Image (spheres, rainbow, N blue to C red):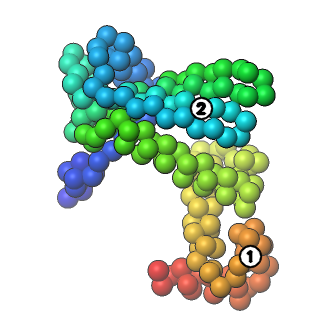
Amino acid sequence: MNLSSYEKEGDYILQVKGNQKKTKEELDIQFNTDIVCDSNITEDFGHGRIETRICDVKNDFEDAPVLTKWRGIHSLIRITTQTLESSTNKERSDVRYYISSLDTTAERFNKLIRSHWAIENNLHWTLDVSFNEDKQQRKKDHAAENMNMLCKMALNILKLDTENKKTLKWKKNRAIYVDEYREKLIARSQTC
């Protein structure tokens, strides 16, 4: 029997994407007509900009037939990001919605969502630097997804080499050209 994450008592925080039009419309209505349960504001200064993140959470929502179809849904989250570029004085604002099975504070949601993106951005940067992923032109069928998965697997195997203090790019090139090194990495990965 295959149990869903919810049945296994796992929780979720899912970003609502642009192609989920009805879900996004219901979230717009919920946040524009009702009072939010909790809010949290954080400010980050760096990279030549000031970023203000406002996290609003609602736990009490009605008349939302699309939203209530989500199993275990407990919270609606709106993240409003306001960015001020110091060099140009240009302001930008962005709103993203999330749904979650968690019942927690706006402060915690703000941290959880922010930390997810920090991990995601770090992984993307590493894949791009080590594997030139942004320059890949694979578009046929699932080629891009498959290649991304293979690169992540290779990245994890390369990270198993803790003896060498060299860069991941160096380890990747060594694995390409030195059979013994590559075999050692693969053998090590099979013991994990």
Q: Going from the N terminus, do you reach mark 1 or mark 2 first? A: 2
**What's under tag 2, amino acid-wise?**
Glu
For mark 1, what is the residue? 166
- Which residue is nearer to you in this view: 126 or 184? 126
**Quarter-of-image position of residue 126:** bottom right
Q: Secondary structure at mark 2?
A: strand
Left or right: where does residue 29 sit relative to residue 160?
left
- Contact (Cβ within 8 Å) of mark 1 with mark 2: no
Image coordinates for residue 140, horizontal then vertical, percent: 65, 44
Establish if 61 lies above or below 188.
Answer: above
Marking on residue 51? 2
Q: Secondary structure at mark 1?
A: loop
Residue 22 seen in this snapshot: no
Q: Nearer the viewer, mark 1 or mark 2?
A: 2
Residue placed at 58% from the left, 21% from the top? 93
Residue placed at 78% from the left, 23% from the top? 88
Left or right: where does residue 183 sit relative to residue 98?
right
Residue placed at 71% from the left, 69% from the top? 168
**What's under tag 1, amino acid-wise?**
Lys
Residue 41 seen in this snapshot: yes
Establish if 19 lies above or below 119.
Answer: above
Establish if 120 lies above or below 89.
Answer: below
- Which residue is nearer to you in this view: 170 or 95? 95
Image coordinates for residue 54, horizontal then vertical, percent: 46, 28
Dot 1, how many residues are within 10 Å of its Cα: few (below 14), some (14-19), or many (20+)? few
Image coordinates for residue 43, horizontal then vertical, percent: 54, 34
Q: Quadrant of the N terminus?
A: bottom left
Report how far apart the C-alphas of labels 1 and 2 lie in the structure.
Answer: 35 Å
Residue placed at 43% from the left, 35% from the top? 15
Image coordinates for residue 16, horizontal then vertical, percent: 43, 30
